[in-house]
Amino acid sequence: NGIAGSYAEYVPLLHIVGAPCSGVQQRGELLHHTLGDGDFHPFYRMSESVTAARAILTAQNACYEIDRVLEVMLTQSRPGYLMLPADVAKKPATPPVNALTIPPFPVNEACLNA
């Protein structure tokens, strides 16, 4: 798929996955985001081998985790994965205190001169 291809080709792609509300997930309701068993995390687990960083966002961790995943994604030039429950998307967020600090991408002089 596109995420695995991006991993193989060192493309920093952010995969944001919309998910049902946190309460629905905690109750294990049977919805299309499960494999029919009430577990909302199989796709999150599957993404582990094709992402540099991933997170399930909560109202408490969203700001930190978004920055962490972006930083790892850009530093390693590999995909990142964020699972965003619908209720978390509606919560107010605190702006980060500092900007992300990403080291500059290395330049391959041989490729530039080819």
Image (spheres, grey):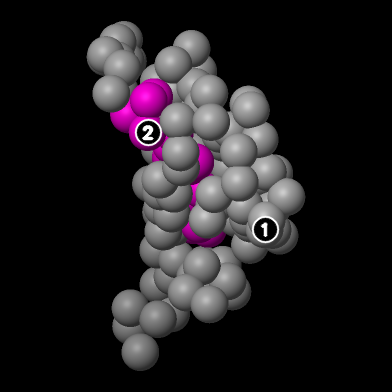
Q: Which mark is residue 73?
A: none
Tags 2 and 1 in contact by the CB under 8 Å rule? no
Circle 1: element type: loop
Q: Residue at x 40, y 72 (%)?
A: 109
Examine the rendering and report whether any part of residue 68 can be seen.
no
Q: Amino acid at mark 2?
A: Ala
Give the answer, above or below, for where 25 lies relative to 72. Answer: above
Q: Nearer the viewer, residue 113 or 102?
A: 102
Examine the rendering and report whether any part of residue 36 can be seen.
yes
Q: Left of 40 or right of it: where is 49?
A: right
Part of the protein shown in magenta:
70-89
Give the answer, above or below, for where 91 lies relative to 77. Answer: above
For marks 2 and 1 on the same chain, the one whose residue lies earlier in the sequence:
1
Q: Residue at x 53, y 23 (%)?
A: 23
Q: Residue at x 47, y 74 (%)?
A: 2
Q: Residue at x 41, y 59 (%)?
A: 13
Circle 2: element type: helix
Q: Which residue is mark 1?
A: 35
Q: Left of 36 or right of it: where is 21?
A: left
Q: Left of 96 or right of it: where is 33?
A: right
User: Which is closer to the viewer, label 2 or label 1?
Assistant: 1
Q: Which residue is mark 2?
A: 86
Magenta-span inclusion, residue 23 = no
Q: Nearer the viewer, residue 112 or 105?
A: 105
Magenta-span inclusion, residue 74 = yes
Asked which quadrant contains residue 102, the reply is: top left
Point out residue 17 in the picture as x, y percentages from the top left corner.
Answer: 44, 49
